Image (cartoon, rainbow, N blue to C red):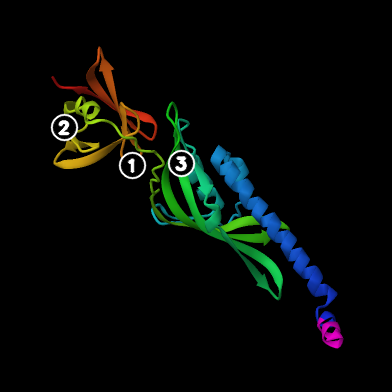
Amino acid sequence: MKNYIFTLFILISPFQILSAQNNEALIKEAIKSDSLFWTAYNKCNVSEMMRFIPNDVEFYHDKGGITKGASNLEITFQRNLCGNKDFRLRREAIDKTVQTFPMKKDDKLYGLIISGDHYFYINETGKKEFRDGLAKFTDLWILENGAWKMSRVLSYNHGPAPYLNERKEVKLSSEILKIYNGKYNSAKNGVISIETQNSVLNLVAGGKTLVLYPETPNKFFAKERDLIFEFIKEKNKVIKMNVYENGNLLEEDKKIE
């Protein structure tokens, strides 16, 4: 056994050990560069973002097509991502999905693939931030003259972010629920109806029904989307229903007498 261990040890040369340690340090640097790039992205700091972009960059987007070259990508960042000061995107990687894949030649590290899923949040002036999109990403970082560059970028499988309802339903008496019954004038959907059914309210509009679950005696929520329905009283009489989406006031629907 001792001879086996000794033989195994001499087969692993000091060069191999040093190479492995060096590769590990380089991977950490690549991951740090990736983090710095996305921090700049979220701040719309285009000049800082471009510090990590090589001249021959290729960016593939399943909705926006192909962008080649650093100058063209910089224009895209300036016009689309950062063109409207009242509208910003924030990107957030989903940690449990992120993977790294070292790229080597003759055991020497030359690149690193970072891939996974990420969310996109919308920030609009005067409104609450909300999670809007979900997509996959695959980024190839190349080591160039001692610096890491995001050389190839794939952004794909874009779609809406799934809504995860965390609100808790409470029980209300039928007497409380019935006071919200009636018709309401919606600027977007015309006349809508609120009807009591067992322990919930049904909102009926355009032949479709949305179930509203009580969260408080006068606030209800939908489980499919981040929608809140707040009933407003005046002198113990319901006068309107405020509708909020993603924490922002969407419309005020007056109750029809």
**Mark closer to the chain start, 2 or 3:** 3
Q: Foreground: 143 or 98?
A: 98
Does the rendering let one see residue 139? no
Numbered label attached to residue 225: 1
Q: CA distance from mark 3 to mark 1?
A: 15 Å
Residue 154, placed above or below residue 190: below
Quadrant into which the N terminus falls = bottom right
Q: Position of residue 155 (x, y in %)?
A: 47, 56
**Mark closer to the chain start, 3 or 1:** 3
**Mark closer to the chain start, 2 or 1:** 2
Q: Position of residue 230 (x, y in %)?
A: 30, 27
Q: Amino acid at mark 3?
A: Tyr
Given this view, does label 3 or label 1 mark the residue nearer the observer? Answer: 1
Numbered label attached to residue 121: 3
Q: Which residue is mark 2?
A: 193
Q: Amino acid at mark 2?
A: Ser
**Which element is circle 1 on?**
loop
